[in-house]
Each structure stands twice: as structure tokens, then as C-alpha cells.
């Protein structure tokens, strides 16, 4: 750029192209990072999945599965089994059985969280479970009426996927 370019108000296009390309790249990366963070930061609680979520009742203890997703060929939202070795969103680490009482969603929720917490701390008694979180998958009023008293305890990694089975090997 010469002094005359500055005086006439013209700027060389070469440096501007670099700045524009840099800003576009930064904007694209920020957008991708923001969408990745919002997709991964799913809060999982006792309402995330339940006994009536299609596919959940096919999951056995120790098996992995992905978060519910819409599958048109299945007719809606389903939970799909996924081999732990391939990485998954969740792993069932056990089941606890609730007492056979009248339907009481508040008492069931308290029982489910307490029982799954006890199972979690006995499964991961040291620091190995610090990166992991858990949630209960509970019976619904309808499945309770049919005799379902089992609560599935599920472990997951907040903000990321499990890269294999997280169950300790004894």
C-alpha cells in the first residue's frame, strides 16, 4: 500500500481478504462449538426416559444405549441398544426393586434416586466415578398398574459419550 492509497481512502484488498477469512472461520468454529455444547449438555433426570420409552425395556443390566432419538421407521422416538465397545450415551449399571405399594410418584422418585445413588457409590467407591453421573429410569403409573416395580439405574458422562463399558472389572 502506498501513501497515495491512504490519502485516497483505498485499501489493498489482500490484507482484507485474510481478515474476512479469519473472521468467517472464527464465526463458523464458534457456531459449531456452541451447537456441540448444547447438544452434549443434556440434563438427565428421572423424567429423561421411563418404562414407557420405546426400546428401554429391551435393555439389560450392563448394556449400553443411546439417548432417545426420532426414527421415522420406528414410528417415533425410541431408545436403541448400542454395544458398549462402540461408545454410547448411557449404560444400565443395575436394577433396584421398589416395594409393592400404591402408586406414589413422590415416594418412588425419592426411592429411585436414593437406591441408584447407593448402587452408584458401591459400584464406583473411589474417584473412578467422578466423571460419571447417574439417573433412574422409573416405572410410570401405567406400568406400575401392570406390576412393574423395577427401576433401572443408568450411568452417563455429562457432556460426552461413554467410550466403552464403565463398569469396573473385579
Image: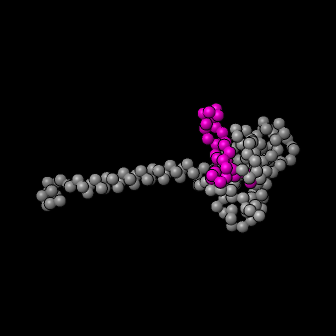
Q: Quadrant of residue 9?
A: bottom left
Q: Relative to 52, is 119 above or below?
A: below
Q: Nearer the viewer, residue 91 or 102?
A: 91
Q: Quadrant of residue 71?
A: top right
Whether the magenta-drawn stretch holds residue 99 is answered as no
Q: Nearer the viewer, residue 73 or 8?
A: 73
Indicate left or right for 92 with 102 as reference: left
Q: Quadrant of residue 79?
A: top right
From the top left corner, tell me how far across and down residue 73 is, in percent: 62, 33
Whether the magenta-drawn stretch holds residue 92 is answered as yes
Q: Relative to 69, is 118 above or below?
A: below
State the quadrant of the N terminus.
Answer: bottom left
Q: Among all residues in the image, which is located at the extreme right?
A: 100
Q: Relative to 24, is 145 above or below?
A: above
From the top left corner, tell me how far across and down residue 16 is, in percent: 27, 54
Indicate left or right for 93 with 161 as reference: right
From the top left corner, tell me how far across and down residue 157 is, in percent: 63, 56
Q: Nearer the viewer, residue 156 or 167?
A: 167
User: Is any atom of residue 84 visible in this view?
Assistant: yes
Q: Among all residues in the image, which is located at the extreme bottom?
A: 126
Q: State the residue at coordinates (77%, 62%).
A: 122
Q: State the residue at coordinates (44%, 53%).
A: 30
Q: State the residue at coordinates (75%, 42%).
A: 57
Q: Among all residues in the image, which is located at the extreme left?
A: 4
From the top left corner, tell me how far across and down residue 88 is, in percent: 63, 51
State the quadrant of the C terminus.
Answer: bottom right
Indicate left or right for 55 with 31 as reference: right
Q: What span is in magenta? A: 64-93
Q: State the residue at coordinates (72%, 58%).
A: 167
Amino acid at each position: 500500500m502506498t501513501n497515495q492509497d491512504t490519502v485516497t481512502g483505498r485499501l489493498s484488498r489482500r490484507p482484507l481478504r485474510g481478515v474476512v477469512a479469519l473472521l468467517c472461520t472464527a464465526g463458523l468454529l464458534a457456531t459449531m462449538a456452541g451447537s456441540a455444547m448444547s447438544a452434549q449438555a443434556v440434563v438427565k433426570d428421572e423424567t429423561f426416559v421411563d418404562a414407557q420409552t420405546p426400546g428401554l425395556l429391551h435393555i439389560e443390566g450392563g448394556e449400553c444405549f443411546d439417548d432417545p432419538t426420532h426414527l421415522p421407521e420406528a414410528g417415533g422416538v425410541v431408545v436403541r441398544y448400542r454395544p458398549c465397545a462402540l461408545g454410547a450415551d448411557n449404560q444400565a449399571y443395575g436394577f433396584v426393586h421398589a416395594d409393592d405399594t400404591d402408586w406414589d410418584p413422590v415416594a418412588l422418585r425419592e426411592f429411585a434416586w436414593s437406591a441408584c445413588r447407593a448402587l452408584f457409590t458401591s459400584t464406583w467407591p473411589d474417584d473412578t466415578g467422578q466423571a460419571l453421573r447417574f439417573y433412574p429410569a422409573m416405572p410410570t403409573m401405567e406400568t406400575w398398574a401392570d406390576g412393574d416395580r423395577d427401576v433401572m439405574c443408568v450411568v452417563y458422562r455429562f457432556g460426552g459419550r461413554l467410550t466403552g463399558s464403565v463398569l469396573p472389572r473385579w
